[in-house]
Image (cartoon, coloured by chain):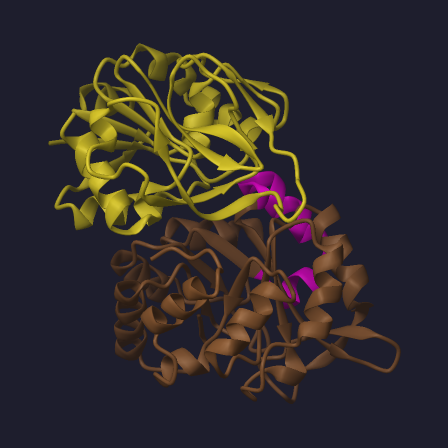
Chain colours: A brown, B yellow
Amino acid sequence: MQFKSHRVMGGILELAQRYRDEGADELVFYDITASPEGRSVDRSWISRVAAELDIPFCVAGGIRSARAAEEVLAAGADKISINTPALENPQLINELARRFGSQCVVIGIDSKLGEKDYTVYMNTGDPERMSQAPRLTLDWVREVQDRGAGEIVLNCMSHDGVRTGYDLEQLKKVRESSLVPLVASGGAGSQEHFLQVFTDARVDGALAATVFHSGSIRLPDLKRYLKANKVQVRQ
Amino acid sequence: MSVAVIDSGGANIGSVMFALQRLGVSGELTRDHGCIRSASRVILPGVGAAADAMTRLRDYGLDELIPTLTQPVLGICLGMQLLFEHSDEGDVECLGVLPGKVERMSAAENLPVPHMGWNTVAPLGELPLLAGVENQYFYFVHGYAVTGSASAMATSEYGTRFVSVAARDNFFATQFHPERSGAPGARLLANFLGE
């Protein structure tokens, strides 16, 4: 799941504890305004959440250097996810993979259908600063893997927040080009959407924020539903 | 109970320290030989790349110290791999405390590498470290693994079978991250502290 809005810390800690107790398999903490604001994710938040969590914890937000990544890992993150900084400086992916291993380097990709093909966008945390990146999505998916990315989170922008289901068409295409774990993001509105994305797009994980934050889908119910439909889940 | 957590730089040190805290133990993050030698338990944590981590262990003389430790030592993930003889990740000689070699996992149909996610752990025999957590789900994040070792105590399946828990004498190792494996992980760490 994804924390996407500016909440007070108490809210985030409470959510983290709730998801931990309800059986979430991983928690992703996105400080999405970090990149457009030219800063990096707040270390003390990471530590306070990490202290409570006994499940994997991935952190994203303006991590622009190996030094910043090291600090985030030392604060208690298990993986770091980079999006805009990787587009600004693709060599950063190689550096982080060499230094920390591919397994903790996650690349977030914000993508939607452009004029020609699926296209990558950057600085998506701020509508005013958002811009098209000089990459087509499938090219970028291959490039980040060549550079050492260990996981890809594909956020399908046209489906994000609309709760009409994951972008199966785009995810299927990216799945074909992704030899590393692929996590779907954007569009979950019902339990059926999760089932579809696992069975049709064969993703390794499904990320969602709104439906969990609002309580419209409860994790234990979702896991029971997926298991009943033959998706392997940890319960 | 004093627990030394070896500071090899760049690893997921925070999450290990927090896991110990949740068990009511305060670990000491250190590179100090005296502190490590006198601790009642030692943990070698790990997120990172093998060649890089070995270089740092050598820089601090820890490659000489670790094999001589006599108290229970737990290697986690990369920390486990460093306890073996050799790693293909950067083609590097490791600590040689456990017999076997670390090899790159190969991507199979529908099974992307790195292996990231929850997987079950099947013990090969009785092991106090795994008491109460047999066949539970643990969290894995790795692209390299040991496929065969005389020290194997449990295996997991991901395209191929690999060693997920190893032990020899006072050295213990898990390929998964107990500090991020929910209640079963906490139980395993408690078992280790009770060794």
Say which quarter of the image contains residue A234: bottom left
B121 w.r.t. B65: above or below: below
Determine the residue positioned at 81% across, 68% down: A136
Residue A225 is inside the magenta segment: no
In the image: residue A178, left or right of residue B19: right
Determine the residue positioned at 40% across, 39% down: B176
Where residue A162 appears, as percent x and y from the top left, is 56, 89
**A187 or A140, nearer to the observer:** A187
Where residue A48 appears, as percent x and y from the top left, is 28, 63
Determine the residue positioned at 44% across, 82% down: A210
Where residue A137 appears, as percent x and y from the top left, is 77, 67
Give the overall secondary structure of the magenta segment: helix
The residue stretch that appears in magenta: A82-102
Where residue A212 appears, as percent x and y from the top left, is 39, 78
Q: Is residue B162 visible?
A: yes
**A68 or B177, nearer to the observer:** B177
Say which quarter of the image contains residue B45: top left
Determine the residue positioned at 39% across, 49% down: A74
A203 w.r.t. B142: above or below: below
A7 w.r.t. A184: above or below: below
Residue A98 is inside the magenta segment: yes
Q: Is residue A89 visible?
A: no
A134 w.r.t. B163: above or below: below
**B125 or A35, nearer to the observer:** B125
Say which quarter of the image contains residue B40: top left
